[in-house]
Amino acid sequence: MASATISLSPFVIFLLLLVGIVSWHSCEAREPFACDPKDARTTGLPFCRDSLAVADRVKDLIGRLTLQEKIRLLVNNAAAVPRLGIKGYEWWSEALHGVSNVGPGTKFGGAFPGATSFPQVITTAASFNASLWEAIGRVVSDEARAMYNGGAAGLTYWSPNVNIFRDPRWGRGQETPGEDPVVAGRYAASYVRGLQGNAGHRLKVAACCKHFTAYDLDNWNGVDRFHFNAKVSKQDIEDTFDVPFKMCVKEGKVASVMCSYNQVNGVPTCADPNLLRKTIRGVWHLDGYIVSDCDSVGVYYDTQHYTSTPEEAAADAIKAGLDLDCGPFLALHTEAALKRGLLKEIDVNGALANTLNVQMRLGMFDGEPSKQPFGNLGPKDVCTPAHQELALEAARQGIVLLKNRGPSLPLSPRRHRTIAVIGPNSNVTDTMIGNYAGVACGYITPMQGIGRYARTIHQQGCTNVACTDDKLFSAAVGAARNADATVLVVGLDQSIEAEFRDRTGLLLPGRQQDLVSKVAAASRGPTILVLMSGGPIDVSFAQNDPRIGGILWAGYPGQAGGAAIADVLFGTFNPEGKLPMTWYPQDYLSNLPMTSMDMRSSRSRGYPGRTYRFYKGPVVYPFGHGLSYTKFVHTVASAPTMVAIPLAGRHAHGNTTISGKAIRVTHAKCGRISLGVDLDVKNVGSKDGSHTLLVFSKPPAGHWAPHKQLVAFEKVHVPVKAQRRVRIDIHVCKFLSVVDRSGIRRIPMGEHSLHIGDTKHSISLQAATLGVIKS
Ligand SMILES: *[C@@H]1O[C@H](CO)[C@@H](O)[C@H](O)[C@H]1NC(C)=O
Ligand SMILES: *[C@@H]1O[C@H](CO)[C@@H](O)[C@H](O)[C@H]1NC(C)=O
Ligand SMILES: *[C@@H]1O[C@H](CO)[C@@H](O)[C@H](O)[C@H]1NC(C)=O
């Protein structure tokens, strides 16, 4: 999303203050959006009757609207329909990792000075804990509803961002759950369930999975997202880019999907009926609305010159399946498009049916907000101690221990009484919440967190992360000489990676590396490196430096990040995070245009391929890497060695077992296949801890399959010396299938090898006809 800067005249500011005071007064109980029981014009009208089915109410309302009224409902700042007692509504609110004020629908101040700011999504993803993801969604939607009730926020949130973190330079990679489609899909479904309330058809708030699709370039080497045409193969669409969106819609039951700015294979995504009407709505059955990015319809007309007139641009969007425009374009040009016969009123009705459906399910047409479910939530439910504790817990679970030589960690408050805390990120606040954030309830910086365990000596080392000179180095070196241990907190912030700002390289910026090496060389005690960043950093120098005892990656750890970092450093929390993306060496970029969407490597082009699924070269740290202060061993307790794949319809009537082939998923009776694996996890170390089981599968050899693919993950807490049994169910059709060059998903018959750490187990898949299954 793009945001505009508006300068305000003193008079306008005065007016805004006035409006602010007025709305602050109404803060205690928001006026009904529509269907006010006191409004005689609408009492008794069918669209106001919550006993009727949503579809009937929507139909009734559409039947009462004039064409002009309908058209002013097609945009994010939807106009009021005073005649029917309906107020204006701002659709654009954001809640990527806490209620955010990036969209105009949400404002902090008055009774709502801030909201709980959870870690940035890439950090939360590193917890590999799906119940945590859902729990965060529940807290965020409690706070969102509370703010809505108080007149400070909307009910439609354009989060989460589930694009694949395809290229390590992407400035928005931080917003995503990482590079793996299955992790991203599970994150999407879990967070959306938490936000939407998981209570059938009714919505607590409406979430939105974005940006559909193949959007993961912001501004690289002269190409920006407004002009980019992503050339994507059918194969990569099906087995990479679509996966999180499909899981978001089908499993998360999300109420909205957003199309992106870029084109895919020459067509702007918001004008592509194959992507919107056919795939999202037709195949995945979205029950909700499709919204444009802000202002992507305008962008494909003005910037991409995709159509020759604005009326055609408006008509193309609505006909493709777009229901809501973030931006003014559809309000301005839809009527003329109808007049020119490019569009029919029935097309507009179709779009409104989808947006009104969501507003009805949110209870917006049910009268008094205070009398509805969640109507009791208010300022007391925002930034509660329990919510802030969950933000701290999420940061702890997401921190990844990358290196622990010696071991140097955990530090001991008895032996390490004085800590030199050094680096441009050592005492930061808003750096910790990344982008698409709001106003945090409060912060605990790394300095403050470490200060809870030891005496601290603070030195910045560099003025900021750009670290253009060494003026502050000698003071930093002096601090390290005089302390029992040194903690360097370095890395990136939004000046290096952000929306519309892709990185140019993977190394630490400026002279940060030099600072780290000089301080480590001078340090009297152990030196620990703490990295804050969304994207991966090539820290090979530190990995190889014996003077650097430990490395932690904290991502952007949220409002309580400093406390979580300290808890991990001093061992009151045993680290359990795993990297949700590959950490590549800098020279990985040498033949990797960001504009090349191909996931698979190409030897002839010298193209390395992308993500652990397709790239086989050297890494700094692999996907899934993460150490603990204890040691776990796991073994397969029970797992089948053969799984029969029953075939559906006419394919079931053969009488031989098919082998050595790959069967179309659509030809298999997926619901009847089960593959359960029991694993025993034993904690053989000396600290309680949680262990993440990452189950990878290696399909039988075939040139179009990834060389391995995550098929399931599960996290389990195991006390010292204890053993826990974990059941992992693998959905064969979804996860053991691979996609052929034509984009068709198939289950390869033969030996699939499951890898869980060093443990391996082979399972043979065999297509079975009815006769074989019965026997
Ligand atoms: C660290 O940051 C906090 C919060 O912004 C501030 O109050 C404190 O003075 C800073 N400490 C140092 C040593 O700069
Ligand atoms: C079953 O197998 C026999 C022998 O291979 C073959 O003649 C027959 O046509 C097969 N029947 C079906 C239904 O495929
Ligand atoms: C996952 O997160 C939840 C919520 O914080 C927590 O209660 C649970 O213990 C975590 N699971 C594991 C295995 O650590």
Image: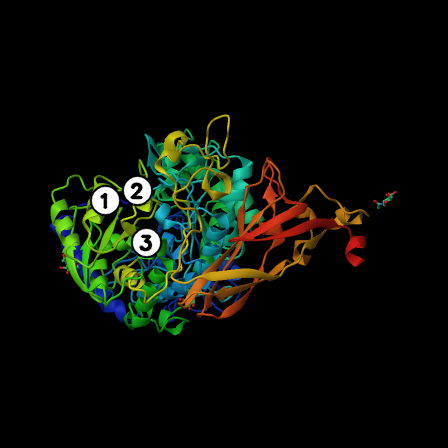
762 vs 483, nearest the viewer: 483
Q: Distance between the residues labelled 1 and 3?
A: 16 Å
Q: Which amino acid does label 2 sit on?
A: Phe
* N-terminal label among 2 and 3: 2
Front residue of 433/472: it is: 472
Q: Do the residues labelled 1 and 2 touch (CB within 8 Å)?
A: yes
Mark 2 neighbour density, 10 Å: few (under 14) some (14–19) many (20 or more)? some
Give the structural element (helix, strand or loop) at label 2. helix
Q: How many labels does the image show?
A: 3
User: Picture quarter containing residue 365?
Assistant: bottom left
Q: Is mark 1 on a helix, strand or loop?
A: helix
The answer to whether residue 40 is left or right of residue 501 is: right
- Image location (x, y in percent) of residue 577: 40, 57
Q: Is residue 302 left or right of residue 183?
A: left
Ligand 3: give its quadrant.
bottom left
Residue indicated by mark 3:
552
Task: Tell me: is circle 1 under 8 Å from ligand 1.
Answer: no
What's the CA distance linking mark 2 and mark 3? 15 Å
Sequence order check, earlier mark of 1 and 2:
1
Q: Mark 1 points at which residue?
A: 517
The three-letter code of the residue at mark 3 reads Leu
Compute the Cα span from label 1 to label 2: 8 Å
Q: Using the rendered image of the protein, determine whether residue 103 is visible from the camera's viewpoint.
A: no
Residue 260 position within the rendered picture, expressed as x and y whole percent measured from the top left = 41, 42
Amino acid at circle 1: Ser
Labelled disc at residue 541: 2
